[in-house]
Amino acid sequence: QVQLVESGGGLVHIGGSLRLSCLASINIFSISSMGWFRQTPGKERELVASISSDGSTTDYADFVKGRFAISRDNAKNMVYLQMDWLKPEDTAVYYCNAVWAGTPLWAHNWGQGTQVTVSS
């Protein structure tokens, strides 16, 4: 069973930056896509960004385009999310997972997530 460990969250002011990291316990080289999701209380988890297996293709939700950048290091089984120009509405718990057709591939296997809080 894959284990996912997210880190890098914290408390920042509006316009600040954070870099999230996700370590997978398996070799992610062959995984078609990896992505970052986020969830706030009372809302469903939503896909924020995804990246293809070789890192050549990225995709972003409209609400983070131009502000967030996803990357991966397959040799280290790591996925990253650089978040710039943060807004209060970015406040959420962020999770990584493999992605298939815009949905989490390991839907029943989530890490603990990392809390991002953006203060106004």
Image (cartoon, rainbow, N blue to C red):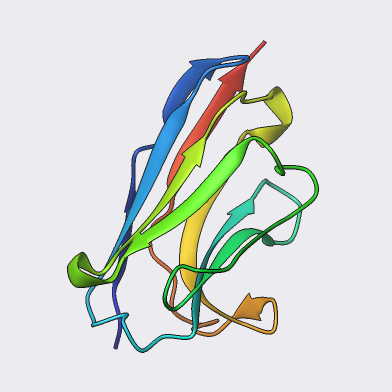
Q: What residue lies at 24% left-to-right and 82% top-to-bottom?
A: 27
The correct choice, above or below, for 59 with respect to 63 in the image is below
The correct choice, above or below, for 51 with respect to 105 in the image is above
In this rendering, the count of numbered labels is 0
Q: Quadrant of the N terminus?
A: bottom left
41 displayed left or right of 95: right
The correct choice, above or below, for 94 with respect to 57 in the image is above
48 displayed left or right of 71: right
Tell me residue 12's x, y (percent): 49, 18
Q: What residue lies at 51% left-to-right and 34% top-to-bottom?
A: 116
15 displayed left or right of 10: right
Tell me residue 41's x, y (percent): 68, 46
Q: What residue lies at 80% left-to-right and 49% top-to-bottom?
A: 62
Q: Quadrant of residue 87?
A: top right
The correct choice, above or below, for 12 with respect to 81 in the image is above
> Along the line of sight, which residue is nearer the eye, 49 or 38?
49
- As drawn, the residue found furthest toward the front would be 56
Q: What residue lies at 25% left-to-right and 69% top-to-bottom?
A: 77
> Along the line of sight, which residue is nearer the eye, 73 or 108?
73
Tell me residue 53's x, y (percent): 44, 78
Tell me residue 79's x, y (percent): 37, 60
Q: Quadrant of the C terminus?
A: top right
